[in-house]
Amino acid sequence: MIIFWVMLAWIGGTAAILGSLMTIASLLLWTIKGNWQGRLKVLGFSIGCAIVGFLLLRLIPFSVL
């Protein structure tokens, strides 16, 4: 059970960190001319990834012992 908890916490933390960094990077891409539809897809995916990561961290109890 503890291994399952650690795996979910690790996945949630990774998704939250990477999603947040991808959101910042995709917002910085708006300063460059280009395809805005592709930027919206990347922005939507990164926000979704960050939300899922934070929800996983919020819903998983701190300790299952």
Image (spheres, rainbow, N blue to C red):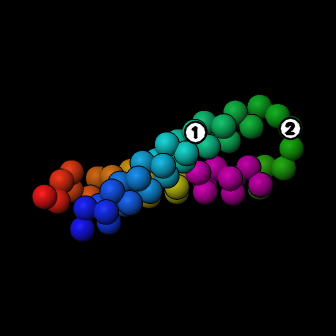
Q: CA distance from mark 1 to mark 2?
A: 21 Å
Nearer to us of marks 1 and 2 is 1
Q: Amino acid at mark 1?
A: Leu
Residue 11 lies in the magenta stretch? no
Residue drawn at point x = 86 percent, y = 44 percent: 34
Q: Main secondary structure of the magenta part?
A: helix
Residue identified by numbered label 2: 33
Report the side of 42 relative to 61 (left or right).
Answer: right
Where's residue 61, x and y in %? 21, 56
Span colored in magenta: 38-46
Residue 59 seen in render: no
Going from N to C along the chain, the mark reached first, 1 or 2, is 1
Labelled disc at residue 21? 1
Q: Secondary structure at mark 2?
A: loop
Report the side of 30 relative to 43 (left or right).
Answer: right
**Quadrant assignment for the C terminus:** bottom left
Residue drawn at point x = 57 percent, y = 39 percent: 21
